[in-house]
Amino acid sequence: MVKKLDIKKVSLGVFLGITLCISGCASKNNEATISQPDESERTHKTESQVPEEETALTPQEQQQILSGENNIQTESDVATYYDTVKNTLQEYINKENAQKALQAGEDVLKKGAKFIVGAEPIGGYYISDLSEETKERFIATFDTIDSMMEQYFPNYKETVSETTSQWLAKGKNKAAEFKDYAREKLEENLSDDQLQALDKAVEKGKTTYSEAKEYVTEKGSQFSDWLKEKKDDVKQKIIEW
């Protein structure tokens, strides 16, 4: 009688133990299921934390940047075209896509440098075909693009190819020669104070040496008034913009 009672107790204990274990395990599994995020949710969170990757210029984009060359009809269009190219490059910089901006900047500056040294034409025109004023406009834009790249990417010259670096050095040297020559042609017409005023105006993009030469030849002593008018014109354009 005692042995049978013991067996019943043991059997009952085993049964209860198994039941409790199954219930407990199921409860833990349910808790784990509730606390564990959905796989798609985890993937979404991970992807949202990764910044969007910068992409390089596609062949179509690379071609588009310089495609306006096909629309050049006159020598003055050469300078206008290069200014448009500068604006396109500025858009990439504004979008903060460094990879595209650097690649576009390298292409644009190399093309400009080759043109300035007379190695390649733009729109069928060589730099020797341009008027002095158009040359200055083109070179001013070239300098602006170079400064723009320096401002946003201080070490950009270290990232471009060796060939591009060499063309840039040649282009900048030749550009400086053109500007020195244009200024020298004015020295006999202007006083030292007028030359200093003109240098500042040209440096800030308010005029060109060629424009000054034409004005001084025609109106001489009114040069200072002319510089003031140029300054006022720039202010008005900024207000309108």
Image (tube, rainbow, N blue to C red):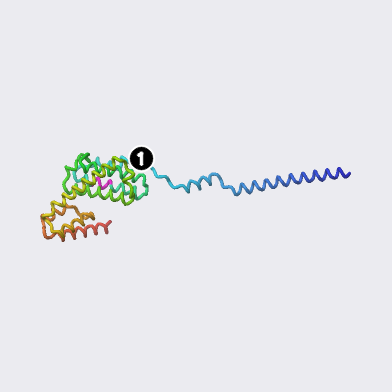
Secondary element under disc 1, as helix, strand or loop, is: loop
Q: Residue at x 42, y 45 (%)?
A: 53
Rendering coords of residue 138 (x, y %): 22, 47
The type of residue carrying mark 1 is Thr
Rendering coords of residue 33 (x, y %): 61, 46
Identify residue for label 1: 58
Label total for image: 1
Residue farthest to the right?
1
Rendering coords of residue 227 (x, y %): 18, 59
Relative to 51, 110 lies left or right: left
Residue 59 vs 238, above or below: the answer is: above
Magenta segment main secondary structure:
helix
Q: Quadrant of the N terminus?
A: top right
Residue 236 part of the magenta-drawn span: no
Q: Pick whichever, 207 or 177, lies toward us.
A: 177
Q: Residues within 10 Å of mark 1 (few under 14, many from 20)?
A: few
Q: Quadrant of the C terminus?
A: bottom left
Q: Residue at x 16, y 57 (%)?
A: 195
Residue 84 part of the magenta-drawn span: yes
Q: Find the magenta span and give its range.
A: 80-85
Rendering coords of residue 141 (x, y %): 24, 49
